[in-house]
Amino acid sequence: MARRAAGTLEREVLAVLWAADRPLTAVEVQAELDPDLAYTTVMTILTRLLRKGVVTRERDGRSYAFSPLVEDEALAANQMHALLRARRDRRAVLAQFVGRLDTDDEHLLAELLNEAQSVDEDNR
């Protein structure tokens, strides 16, 4: 079996949890992902996600069932913020990001910035 890129399995596990209509055990996550994937690998990923505060767990008999604490969009935004904070030249990073947006996303970003500015002004 080919090795996955870093973070890929975490995203796959989260996708399974987001698609579920209830908390899932590690065995259920394993079955949804790949029955050939080791149970211990799935448990390791779920434990990492738990430590990161991305999922929660509750007792389900003798094991635990896991649920996501954040939605996909919030997780992506958190990751974007972390990447930005980790760089010395935030202006250059943001300039590169904005420079690669397509026209629709540029308009959306401008609209969201205007909305955020209006909310800030209203809260003063």
Image (cartoon, rainbow, N blue to C red):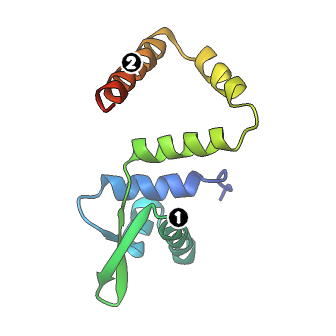
Please tell me which residue lies in front, 54 or 33. 54
Residue at image coords 63%, 15%: 99
Task: Count every numbered label the image shows and give the total.
Answer: 2
Residue 58 falls in image quadrant: bottom left
Q: In the rendered view, does 68 fall on the left or right side of 22?
A: right
Please tell me which residue lies in front, 101 or 113. 113
Q: Disc 2 and disc 1: Cα gap in Å?
A: 32 Å
Is 88 above or below relative to 46? above
Say what amino acid the circle numbered 1 marks: Lys
Q: Earlier in the sequence, mark 2 or mark 1?
A: 1
Residue at image coords 72%, 24%: 92
- Residue holding disc 1: 52
Label of residue 114 in the image: 2
Q: Secondary structure at mark 1?
A: loop
Residue 89 falls in image quadrant: top right
Residue at image coords 40%, 17%: 108
Residue with the most extreme bottom position: 62
Q: Quadrant of the N terminus?
A: bottom right
Label of residue 35 in the image: none
